[in-house]
Structure formats: C-alpha cells, structure tokens
Amino acid sequence: MHLVDIVPAATNTVNTKFILLDNGRIVEDGKETTCLALVADETASVHFQMWGSECGAFEPGDIIRLSDGIFSYHKNNLVLRAGKRGKAEKVGEFAMLFVETPNMSEIRWSRDPNNPKKFVQESVISPYSQIFKPLH
C-alpha cells in the first residue's frame, strides 16, 4: 500500500514501506514515551507516531516496513502508527525515492455520507507538514 492510499480507520490494515525523514523530539508524559516522526514514500508523506523503545530504534534515512499499522487520531493528531497489533522494522537505509507532499496527516477527513464506517478527504489543511516545516 502506498501512503497516498491510506485513510483513517480503527483497524490495523496498513502494510507499507517508507523512509524516515525526521525523528522529531521525544516526549515523556508520565509513563508514556512517544515521538512523532515524518516519513514518506514515492507518493506522499505522513506523521508516524512511535512509542517507547521504537523512538530510539530508528534514525533519519532508515527504510521501515510497517505491518498491520493503523492510521488514526491520537491526541487530536492524525498519525500512522504500529499500534498494539502492528510491527515496524528497519529493512534498509537511504536508497528510496520519496515526496513530502501531500502530507496525509494534514488532510481534513470526514465520514462518507454513503458509508459512515469510512472516511473521505474533505479538504487539505496544508500540502506540507505543519510540524516538520520544509527547508526552503
């Protein structure tokens, strides 16, 4: 699956491969350690939420395979993550084409009027990440 094809859902159905562009910062909130990263493939970018030991396991330039991931809201941010059932593993380094736009986390989604269990794109908040600003 390409990143441009992911849609918000409450199920672990995202199987994809991407390159980590920026690790962001590690946040410790009580017992929970998280970090938000910017990842991309040749079709789009997205914010990738990592937990605990995942935060130190990957570096910019790492190519990561996500199995059974989930694209959903966490603390009002739309993020891709492994979740409890998924798995993120390093499968290579540096050699991957990617684009930074569109950023799938910067799209406003709404429920499909024909199928309330599905989401459709409503509007683009920003073509680029508002957290990881592009270098111009």
Image (cartoon, grey):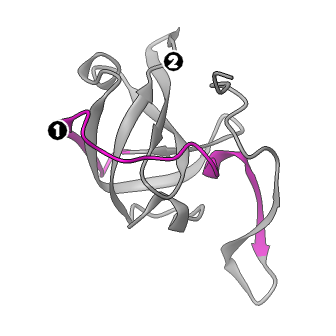
- Residue shown at the point (54%, 62%) measured from the top left: 4
Quadrant containing the C terminus in the rendered view: top right
Residue 76 horizontal side relative to residue 78, left or right: right
For this view, does 119 lie left or right of residue 94?
Answer: right
The location of residue 70, given as percent across then percent down, is: 45, 54
**From which residue to which does the magenta span run?**
82-111
Residue at image point 46% right, 21% down: 34
Task: Give the residue number, with chain letter if any, for mark 2.
Answer: 24
Kindly identify the amino acid type of the residue bearing the numbered disc 1. Answer: Gly
Counting residues from the start of the chain, the first of labels 1 and 2 encountered is 2
Nearer to us in this view, 133 or 85:
133
Query: In what element is the residue under mark 2?
Result: loop
Q: How many labels does the image show?
A: 2
Task: List the single residue furthest toward the left.
Answer: 91
Please identify the quadrant where the N terminus is shown: bottom left
* Magenta highlight on residue 78: no
Residue that numbered label 1 is attached to: 92
Where residue 55 sits, quadrant-wise, is top left
Q: To which quarter of the image does residue 120 belong?
A: bottom right
Q: Nearer the viewer, residue 14 or 52?
A: 14
Task: Determine which quarter of the picture holds residue 115.
Answer: bottom right
Residue pictured at 44% horizontal, 16% vertical = 33
Which residue shows up at 65% across the image and 27% down it? Answer: 134
Instruction: Indicate the amino acid at tag 2.
Output: Gly
Q: Position of residue 97 (x, y in %)?
A: 37, 48
Disc 1 to disc 2: CB gap under 8 Å: no
> Is 91 one of the magenta-colored residues?
yes
